[in-house]
Image (cartoon, grey):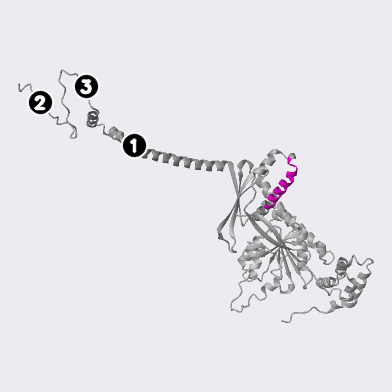
Amino acid sequence: MERNAPTHEVDVAAPQNALPIPEQPSPSHEFGSAELPTSVLKRMDVGTGNDRSSLFGQFANNPFFTAGFGLAGLGVIAAAGRSSLRHGAALLKRRMLVNVEITGRDTAYQWLLQWMSAYQRSQLRSAVSSGTNAGEQRLWDRFLRRVTPNLHDLQIQTSIANRADGSPQTHFSLVPGPGRHIFRYRNAFIAVSRQREKSFDRDGIPFETVTLTTLFSQRHVFEDLFAEAHQMAQQMKEGKTVLYTSHMAEWRPFGQPKRKRPIDSVVLEKGLKERMIDDIKAFLSARTWYLDRGIPYRRGYLLYGPPGTGKSSFIQALAGELDFNIGILNLSERGLTDDRLNHLLTNIPPRTIVLLEDADAAFTNRAKAQEDGFKSMSVTFSGLLNALDGVASAEERVIFLTTNHVSRLDSALIRPGRVDMAVRLGETDAYQIEQLWDRFYGEFDDGTQGKHRFMEKMYRLGLIGQTSAAQLQGLFLYNRGDMEGAIDMVDQLKEPPPTNTD
């Protein structure tokens, strides 16, 4: 009986964490005839080594885990989508849009602002005029005009000009202010972004930039836009001469542009004015000739003579005749060093005559100390020579030097290469006096009897060749429209002008 009793042995090779196997069914029952409980099957799976799949199943059946994993996955997908959209938009922007940036220090900056203001006003006027004939306008044009936004952020610019009688006249203009604007130009929508930085330049003016954006396919409108802005700026200066002065190391406009002075208003010796005009015109038209022969393309002129003989007046009239501007440089200015002088003469505004007035006075007291015991920081004589004709001197330049005392100028300053043409403007001769008389009294003196009487008196008093053009002009201005009064007051020209006794 004991041999037939069933025995239960434990396999030593079984894993330590294995659960005890239940008793086997009797032979009279088939193995698959009954199903095992689910809990038993799970415990059997653990014992058979499927630990990883069972662990994943537990996490997968955990609602907290699946919810957190889903949210994390959605966050990753959203971040990837957002990054893709951002990069896609940047790529699309680079492919489809084009930007043009203009800084506040660029010459075209003010041109663009003024043009935008004028263009907006013209659009408003056209919209008002088209309202009366709306039936004649195309539907598409009216739609574009309606959907195009107007300029809302504006900035005011004030300018003061003098009338003919000398009284000031104030002009106000509205230009696009800082912010974003949109306007339509030749059926192309252009976005404008004017930004003002928090940093300032040496004059306390904030740095500004204007960025224009449009479709890449319509980028050609920028060329037309800037061409119109430049043309409008030139029209505003048409018939005027801009005066520049040095400010630190740059040229800046000084005051309002002046009306061009007619070249006929300056009366010089017979043939002298025409000779100088022909010389400078020949120089301006011979740029290629100079460059082909390796000759520096620059020209220097020296005008000398007594005060009031028309030196500065002739330069102003010559600039108007040639459609040039004038850059005035004071060599005796305190703080003007050699480096600044060289920089200014190298960066001259286009089509500008440089005027160095009273060149002799710049070095009269250059060795004397000031009241504080220090010498003034001014340009040296050698610095001026190097700026005019040194290795680093600029080309494509026209310079005029004026002086009342040519004998005080060093011969090195007026040698050929630095001064190519020296002209003396002296007291008026008979030809000049007659020309000035005709300009002031030609409409009153029909038979030229008054001119003959005036000239006879000038000869009798010995004033021919002894009177400056400024003295004669002062006499004629005092007796404007009264030639008899001018003849009676000729005696006063013989009196010497008052001198400063201080």
Give the foreground label among 1 and 2.
1
The residue most toward the left is 1
Q: Are marks 3 and 1 in contact (CB under 8 Å)?
A: no
Of the residues under marks 3 and 2, which one precedes in the sequence?
2
Q: Amino acid at mark 3?
A: Ala
Q: Amino acid at mark 2?
A: Thr
Q: How far apart, in angstroms, are the residues tagged by discs 1 and 2?
A: 46 Å
Foreground of the two, 397 or 483: 483
Q: Amino acid at mark 1?
A: Pro
Image point 87% across, 76% down: which residue? 489
Main secondary structure found in the magenta portion = helix
Magenta span includes 339: no
Q: Quadrant of residue 449?
A: bottom right
The residue most toward the bottom is 501
Of the residues under marks 1 and 2, which one precedes in the sequence?
2
Q: Which quadrant, please, contains the N terminus?
A: top left
Q: How far across and how far down the image is residue 359, in percent?
A: 70, 70
Q: Which residue is tagged 3?
A: 34
Image point 20% across, 20% down: which residue? 31
Circle 3: is it few (<14), some (14-19), or many (20+) Cα within 10 Å? Answer: few
Q: What stretch of residues is rendered in magenta?
A: 117-134
Determine if residue 396 is in view: no
338 is higher (above) or lower (below) than 11: below
Foreground of the two, 7 or 329: 7
Q: How far across and how far down the image is residue 132, in percent?
A: 75, 44
Q: Quadrant of residue 188?
A: top right
Q: Are marks 3 and 2 in contact (CB under 8 Å)?
A: no
- Secondary element type, mark 2: loop
> Tag on residue 7?
2
Q: Which residue is tagged 1?
A: 63
Circle 2: is it few (<14), some (14-19), or many (20+) Cα within 10 Å? Answer: few
